[in-house]
Image (cartoon, rainbow, N blue to C red):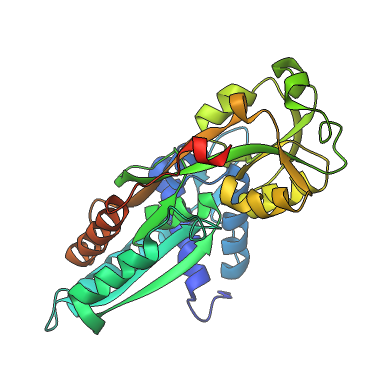
């Protein structure tokens, strides 16, 4: 007996993940497309099966295989997504093609970065389209921002992720400065920088961002001891403040704690990273003109003043 009596936003998210897995032929390919871990995708699939009341597929050493029930759910889901897209496009065309609601997915703490001009961009957008369009801003960790854009749950995203899925385009808008930090109580906290070698850094546990870790950072820290995992700037902050790990934290997030004596930057002369922040969106879909207008406002706003704070002013 079907348990699902009403389709919620959660169900749509779960169905989109399931459809992507089927489209890609398994979890591995879908992971790159959605930019979420296989464990998260597996959890999505299990939750969907619980909500539906039956098993959709077989997965394991033998590979991924749809069951007959899974085939029917997949086809119905694709029809549902197509109908939703048609509905959005039809509503947008009623009277004004620059009307509707846009969702912007923003990584946590990015808006508080002094280099972020999203508020100015939203003001500019309002001047151009007035109240005909509504904007919903959602804060989330990196893999959620990029995956929400990939599966259509969000129209645009601001992210530092360097992994993108098919049909998603990216453009650099400003830079974020990342500092390798440790908290009070960590063995390196009171050691002067000139007495800390690169080899010593590798001796202490390092908290990565798991599947969110940027490739350029992973290349530098690959020899570090494996520590905890923090998904997002606030999670990394908590782990560094605990004294358990070295970890990269956005400079604007770390500064108040550095000034309070609870955190320190370790060897910024060799560890500091300039991380590009990208605006991402799908190449096609509903509200194309409206999305293009908002994207243009965001890009223009970030070109009106230097997009990155010079590293010399942070020393």
Foreground of the two, 167 or 46: 167
In the image, 30 versus 267, the foreground residue is 267
The number of callouts visible is: 0
Image quadrant holding the N terminus, namely: bottom right
306 displayed left or right of 272? left
Q: Which residue is drawn at the image coordinates 51% and 40% (left, top)?
A: 313
Image coords of residue 199 (percent x, y): 73, 15
| Residue at (39, 56) in percent of width and height | 157
Q: Is residue 73 visible?
A: no
Instruction: Note whether residue 127 is visible.
Output: yes
Residue at 87% over, 32% down: 187
- Where residue 253 appears, x then y in whole percent? 61, 53
Q: Quadrant of the C terminus?
A: top right
* Position above or below: 188 against 306: above
Q: Is residue 83 above or below residue 109?
A: below
Residue at the image point whose x is 35% and y is 50% from the top: 280
| 100 vs 171: above or below | below
Q: Nearer the viewer, residue 183 or 294?
A: 183
Seen in the image, is 254 located left or right of residue 103? right
Residue 247 is situated, as x and y percent measured from the top left of the image, at: 69, 38
Where residue 213 sits, quadrant-wise, is top right
Q: Is residue 138 left or right of residue 120?
A: right
Query: Front-most of 178 and 10?
Result: 178
Q: Position of residue 26 (x, y in %)?
A: 48, 40
């Amino acid at each position: 007996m079907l348990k699902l009596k009403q389709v919620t936003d959660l169900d749509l998210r779960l169905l989109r993940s399931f459809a992507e897995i089927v489209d890609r032929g398994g979890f591995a390919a879908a992971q790159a497309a959605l930019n979420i871990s296989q464990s998260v995708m597996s959890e999505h699939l299990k939750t969907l099966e619980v909500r539906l009341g039956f098993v959709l597929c077989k997965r394991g050493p033998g590979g991924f295989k749809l069951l007959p029930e899974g085939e029917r759910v997949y086809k119905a889901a694709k029809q549902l997504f197509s109908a939703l897209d048609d509905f959005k496009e039809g509503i947008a065309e009623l009277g004004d093609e620059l009307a509707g609601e846009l969702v912007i997915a923003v990584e946590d703490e990015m808006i508080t970065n002094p280099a972020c001009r999203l508020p100015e961009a939203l003001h500019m957008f309002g001047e151009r389209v007035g109240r005909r369009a509504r904007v919903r801003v959602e804060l989330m960790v990196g893999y959620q921002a990029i995956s929400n854009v990939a599966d259509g749950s969000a129209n645009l995203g601001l992210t530092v992720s360097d992994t993108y899925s098919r049909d998603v385009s990216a453009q650099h808008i400003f830079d974020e400065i990342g500092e390798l930090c440790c908290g009070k109580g960590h063995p390196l906290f009171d050691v002067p920088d000139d007495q800390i070698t690169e080899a010593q850094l590798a001796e202490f546990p390092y908290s990565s961002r798991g599947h969110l870790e940027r490739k350029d950072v992973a290349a530098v820290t690959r020899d570090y001891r494996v520590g905890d995992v923090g998904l997002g700037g606030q999670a990394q902050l908590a782990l560094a403040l605990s004294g358990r790990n070295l970890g990269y934290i956005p400079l604007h997030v770390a500064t108040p704690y550095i000034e309070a004596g609870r955190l320190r930057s370790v060897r910024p002369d060799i560890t500091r990273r300039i991380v590009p922040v990208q605006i991402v969106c799908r190449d096609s879909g509903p509200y194309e003109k409206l999305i293009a207008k908002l994207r243009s406002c965001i890009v223009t706003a970030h070109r009106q003043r230097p997009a990155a704070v010079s590293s010399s002013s942070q020393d």
